[in-house]
C-alpha cells in the first residue's frame, strides 16, 4: 500500500487551547487523517515526535520559548522526510522569508478553512509545496519589486536603519538606538523603499537578508 493510501499521521502544535480544539474538530472525522497528538508547545512536540510515527506537523509560528520555524528545523534535522505546515498571521512578511529559507513545505493563514487545510496536508504529504494565495501574494510582491539589487547604493546610516528594520525593531526603537528622531527614521525607511524598489516590508527584509545587511 502506498503512502497516499495510508492514513496521514498528523501532530498539531499550538499554545492556545481553543485553537487546538478547533483544529481537532476540523480534522478528526477525516478518514485519511490520523491525529497522533495535540500539544501546547514545541518541547512537547519533540517528545511526541521521538516516540511515534509522524508524517505532517501542523504548527503555529508564534509560540513561547521556541517558535514554529525553530521547531521545524529541529524535527527536520532528526528526520529529513518530515513535512511541516506553518500557520501564521497575515502580513508577517519576515516569517515567509524564513519559511523559504528553511524549506518548510506549507504556509497558511492561521484562520484558514477546513478545505484549504486538508489540501495543504495532502499536498505536503505527497512531496509538494502548499502556500495560501495570501502568502504567495506577499512573497511575490517582494520578490519582483525590483531586479538588480546589486546596483543599489546605500549610505552607512541607511544600512544601519535597514539592519534594525530586519531585526523587527519599531520606528521609535530605531530612533533610540541610533540617537535620531522618529521622523528621520521614517524618512530613511521611505528612501530605502524607493532605492530598493519596493512598497512593502517584505522587499526590505528580502534585500537585507540577501545582501547580509542584518
Image: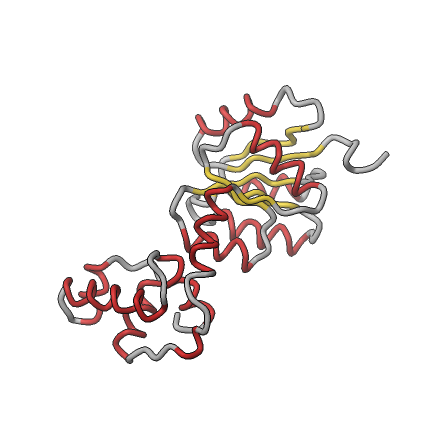
Seen in the picture, residue 5 relative to 87 is either above or below; the reply is above
Q: Residue at x 48, y 54 (%)?
A: 140
Seen in the picture, residue 31 relative to 108 is either above or below; the reply is above
Question: Picture coordinates of residue 37 (x, y %)?
Answer: 61, 32
Q: Is residue 35 left or right of residue 209?
A: right
Q: Is residue 80 left or right of residue 141?
A: right
| Residue, far top | 29
- Foreground residue, 42 or 184? 184
Please state the total of marks drawn on the protein image: 0
- Foreground residue, 159 or 16? 159
Q: In which quadrant is the N terminus drawn? A: top right
Q: Residue at x 26, y 64 (%)?
A: 189
Q: Residue at x 46, y 69 (%)?
A: 147
Q: In which quadrant is the C terminus drawn? A: bottom left
Question: Picture coordinates of residue 35 (x, y %)?
Answer: 64, 29
Snapshot quadrant of residue 151: bottom left
Q: Is residue 63 left or right of residue 194?
A: right
- Foreground residue, 152 or 57? 152
Question: Picture coordinates of residue 164 (x, y %)?
Answer: 31, 66
Seen in the picture, residue 115 relative to 2 is either above or below; the reply is above
Q: Residue at x 40, y 57 (%)?
A: 202
Question: Picture coordinates of residue 36 (x, y %)?
Answer: 65, 31
Color encoding of the figure: secondary structure
Amino acid at each position: 500500500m502506498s503512502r497516499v493510501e495510508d492514513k496521514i499521521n498528523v501532530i498539531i502544535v499550538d499554545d492556545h487551547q481553543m485553537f487546538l480544539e478547533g483544529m481537532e474538530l476540523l480534522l478528526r472525522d477525516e478518514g485519511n487523517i490520523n491525529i497522533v497528538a495535540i500539544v501546547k508547545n514545541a518541547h512537547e512536540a519533540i517528545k511526541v515526535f521521538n516516540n511515534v510515527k509522524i508524517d505532517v506537523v501542523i504548527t503555529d509560528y508564534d509560540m513561547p520559548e521556541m517558535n514554529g520555524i525553530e521547531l521545524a528545523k529541529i524535527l527536520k534535522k532528526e528526520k529529513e522526510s518530515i513535512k511541516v505546515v506553518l500557520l501564521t498571521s497575515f502580513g508577517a512578511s519576515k516569517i515567509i522569508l524564513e519559511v523559504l529559507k528553511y524549506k518548510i513545505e506549507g504556509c497558511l493563514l492561521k484562520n484558514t478553512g477546513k478545505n484549504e487545510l486538508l489540501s495543504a496536508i495532502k499536498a505536503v504529504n505527497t512531496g509538494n509545496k502548499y502556500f495560501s494565495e495570501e502568502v504567495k501574494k506577499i512573497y511575490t510582491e517582494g520578490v519582483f519589486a525590483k531586479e538588480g539589487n546589486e546596483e543599489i547604493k546605500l549610505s552607512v546610516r541607511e544600512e544601519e536603519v535597514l539592519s534594525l528594520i530586519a531585526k523587527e525593531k519599531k520606528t521609535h526603537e530605531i530612533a533610540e538606538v541610533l540617537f535620531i528622531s522618529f521622523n528621520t527614521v521614517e524618512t530613511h525607511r521611505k528612501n530605502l523603499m524607493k532605492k530598493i524598489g519596493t512598497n512593502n516590508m517584505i522587499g526590505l527584509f528580502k534585500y537585507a537578508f540577501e545582501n547580509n545587511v542584518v
